[in-house]
Amino acid sequence: MTEVEDRLWRLGIPAKTRHNEVAPAQFELAPMFEDLNLAVDHNMLIMEVLKQTAEANGLVCLLHEKPFEGVNGSGKHCNWSIAYGGKNLLSPGDSPRDNAIFLTFLSAIIRAVDLHADLLRFATAGAGNDHRLGANEAPPAIISIFLGDELSAVMQAIEEGTRTKRTGRLTFKFGVDTLPALPKDSTDRNRTSPFAFTGNKFEFRTPGASQNCAASQTVLNTIVAESIDAICDKLEARGGDFNTELQNLLQRLIRKHKRVLFSGDGYGDAWPKEAAKRGLPNLADTLEAIAPLEDPANRALFAKYGVLTEGEMASRHEIAAEDYASRILIEGKVALEIARSMIRPVVADEFSRLATAIGQAKKDGLKVGVRGLTALSLKLGAGLDDLHVKCEKIEKAIGKGVPRGILAALGDLRSTVDRLEMLVDDAKWPLPKYRQMLFIY
């Protein structure tokens, strides 16, 4: 049997088969990961079918996380739990022993996410997802855990060594007390939490629509395995009553790692400031999010469990950085081409048409309507000048090849084009306008 299997047995997880009365049980670990692999495979197959079906019908299936300003992004929710011997270890049980197992694994996950939030963010890094995270029904880039009111109260009771009932405050003892009934889905429906407990599983909401969830699952499995290992090390190093030692250990874990627990509004301006005070990482863009791959401690973690070698971690960082830079460069070049070859000619034609109409009206001695035509032509003229400046700016940024500079120039160009879209005749505008894409007439 493996060391991990032996340690799970020592934690009291029920065995599936027992070879003899003395030896620990032999567990089957593979089914835990087979379900995850199958779900990821199914998701990727669905994405491929969507693309092929769209193409067969003369359409394009857009899996970009945030293609439109002011419109909800598109992401994935990974429902993750730990099942062992036919039992979901994240389901609160009906007995003190089952509750001890549940709270131990819950504490291990809290510790794992707190210590390795940077790796979870890396697993969801991408040019498209950078636009999505933080608003419009997408969680922020700051990784935190939502437990719900009931479970948060339980964790506080463990930390303080008490539990609250209507009849008063009583000591909460492992191996003696049972948990109160918890709702099966206590999730926050506004989706501001990146990692939310939903009754008997966690829901990781940060992955983007175009991404492969295998990366998030790999990180989750690795960091939680390390956390379980650490708990086992602590318990095995101590003597005395097992339940008492476990309670004391989980109290310390909760006190140390509770900073990652957050039940408030992840969209609010106050949360990034509060997260910074707590020391939580806020890796806002892909370049920041992939930096943890270069951390020697992170490389050693993945190497320790045989998941990735240091060379494989280095190659993933290099590939991610190159892919990101390539995507931003392509976006910048395409935007520049669209602005110069599609937008500018239409705006120039509209401006020219208005100038001709104004000149003709003055020639004919007309006063009605001239003021309106003049005001519109001034806006178009100013927009045309601004468009020229923004195109020059983005061209320079592309020449330097710095992704952040290109993104800043893209944002400026986008704001100018959006203003012009509101001024030019629908029949002449070369692209679908927002209202045409978002509403059916």
Image: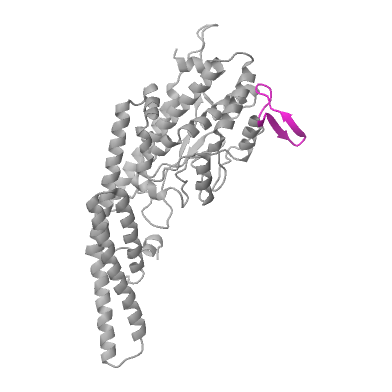
Residue 339 vs 50, above or below: the answer is below
Residue 379 vs 403, above or below: the answer is below
Give the x, y percent position of residue 76.
Answer: 42, 43
Magenta segment, which residues?
160-179
Q: Quadrant of the N terminus?
A: top left
Identify the residue shown where x is 31% and y is 34%: 316
Near-viewer residue (411 or 64): 411
Examine the rendering and report whether any part of residue 125 can be seen: no
State how many labels appear.
0
Residue 86 vs 404, above or below: the answer is above
Q: Quadrant of residue 34?
A: top left
Near-viewer residue (194 or 214): 194
Identify the residue shown where x is 36% and y is 67%: 419
Residue 351 painted magenta: no
Near-viewer residue (226 or 151): 226
Give the x, y percent position of residue 421.
Answer: 34, 67
Near-viewer residue (67 or 268): 268
Give the x, y percent position of residue 230.
Answer: 50, 22
Q: Which residue is at the far front?
A: 277
Give the x, y percent position of residue 153.
Answer: 64, 36
Identify the residue shown where x is 35% and y is 62%: 415
Identify the residue shown where x is 24% and y is 74%: 349
